[in-house]
Image (spheres, rainbow, N blue to C red):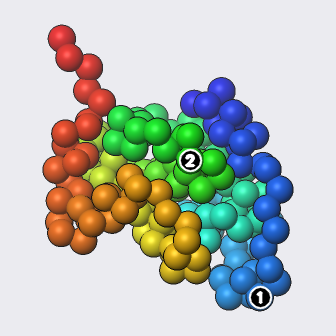
Amino acid sequence: MKVVAAGLLALLSLPVMASAEKQRERPNTDVSADSADKNVIRQAVRDHEADPLSKEARTKLAPMLLAHFEDMPYVVCLDQVPGLEGEGRFGKALLWQMVFGTGMFIEQNPGRAADREAYMLAGLQSAVRAYRNVRAKDPKKTIALFEELDDMEQHGKLREHVHAHACVKKP
């Protein structure tokens, strides 16, 4: 996870300009607060989901969340989102949101930490919400795969997609 995290963080650290107006529209996580505080982490995940392309998401929230979830053992299945890492900064931000949404689900539902389908679904749903938030601000930003995932989510079919792409090793 550390190597993948470092690589993805480096890619997300590309400069992005966010307008001051957009910065004021979002709630801000106090990144100087105790990152062990589950309320701070939950708010940071929500803030990243609200605006995953913001400078704050890239430079403050993502590093804090990566450090927090670093030792949490869970699987983020890239088979669910083929080619997303090739979708530039937007795709990478959505991948991170999958990681953060998954981690938050496990942290809030420790009794379901072994339920891979549940935590994978939670991570993918979080990424779909992040996608919708970006599209609401800029309808020109699209990723075909996430258009499909958004449609599946709206029609209650996202769980089926996760089940079909569970990244379970075949014997």
Q: Which secondary structure, mark 2?
A: loop
Quick one: label 1 or label 2, which is nearer the N terminus? 1
Residue type of the residue flagged with mark 1 = Glu
For the view shown, which residue lies furthest in the front direction? 140
Residue drawn at point x = 38 percent, y = 52 percent: 145
Quarter of image, res 152: bottom left
Quadrant holding the C terminus:
top left
Query: Quick one: 35 or 152, which is closer to the camera?
Result: 152
Q: Position of residue 48 (x, y in %)?
A: 60, 65
Checking the image for residue 87, the label placed there is: 2
Quarter of image, res 49: bottom right
Is 145 displayed left or right of 23 in the figure? left
How many residues crowd around disc 2 within 10 Å: few (fewer than 14), some, or many (20 or more)? few
Can I make out residue 126 in this image?
A: no
How many residues crowd around disc 1 within 10 Å: few (fewer than 14), some, or many (20 or more)? few
Query: Quick one: 162 or 146, which is closer to the camera?
Result: 146
Quadrant holding the N terminus:
top right
Q: Position of residue 158 (x, y in %)?
A: 23, 57
Residue drawn at point x = 77 percent, y = 88 percent: 21
User: Mark 1 sits on what residue?
Assistant: 21
Can I make out residue 114 in this image?
A: yes
Is 80 displayed left or right of 12 in the figure? left
Q: Position of residue 68 (x, y in %)?
A: 62, 49
Is 153 displayed left or right of 126 in the figure? left
Residue type of the residue flagged with mark 2 = Glu
Give how far apart the Cα atoms at labels 1 and 2 are. Answer: 26 Å
